[in-house]
Image: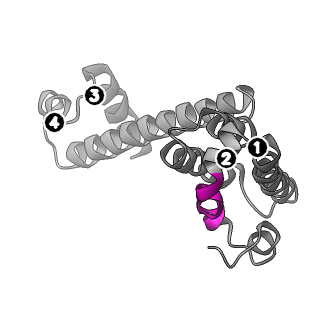
Amino acid sequence: MIDYTAKEIIQKKLYILIPFYLFNYEKQFKECNDDDPEKLEVILNDLRYLEKELNALVNKGKLDSLHQKAIENCTKAVSDQLAHNYDNVRKGVDDIMVGPILNLDIFRIHDEAFEEGIEIGKTEEKRNTALNLLNTNVSVDIISQCTGLSLDEINKLKESVNSEA
């Protein structure tokens, strides 16, 4: 890690190293936190540069926002562990890498949509199973028990199969 500057990480597309970039400064955390705010500013400026570059990559379509968020969250997690005794360092990293609370809404919406997609997939799978069972003349009651679909849903599927035939 120590061999790479912030610019080299971006130039060489080594984005996965960004969270670990903080290890380069670990020995300076005590000074940065207590005695020397200018040293803290050096660290934070590097992180600002990395964050600005990540945003530019997302804007250019070269990095998706989910990977960006993963990098930011990992950087925060590393910061929380490495700088657990240095509140000023941790707060500075959080302010840069976590960003405004509004960013969290994007990922909450993504997670909700993902979960909804999973539920839709499960429902589709249940319907396909029910259709297969209907085609083998299994009773509607047993299909309902096996799939968790309501009798109404199964009867509608049965009607759609019969109307297609």
On whether residue 71 falls in the magenta region, the answer is: no
Question: What coloring was used for the rendering?
Answer: one colour
Q: How many marks?
A: 4
Q: Mark 4: which secondary structure? A: helix
The residue that appears at 76% across and 71% down in the rendered structure is 5
Marks 2 and 4 sit apart, C-alpha to C-alpha, by: 64 Å
Mark 2 Cα-neighbour bin, 10 Å: few <14, some 14–19, many ≥20: some
Q: Which residue is mark 4?
A: 146
Residue 78's spot in the image, x, y percent?
A: 53, 50
Residue type at tag 1: Asp
Q: Mark 1: which secondary structure? A: loop
Q: Which residue is mark 1?
A: 36
Between 22 and 18, the one lying in front of the other is 22
Mark 4 Cα-neighbour bin, 10 Å: few <14, some 14–19, many ≥20: few
Residue type at tag 2: Glu
| Disc with the residue nearer the chain's start (1 vs 2) | 2
Magenta segment: 16-28
Between 129 and 31, the one lying in front of the other is 31
Marks 1 and 2 sit apart, C-alpha to C-alpha, by: 6 Å
Are dots 3 and 1 in contact, CB under 8 Å? no
- Quarter of the figure with residue 138: top left
Nearest to the eye among marks 3 and 2: give it: 2
With 48 as the anchor, is 153 left or right in this view?
A: left
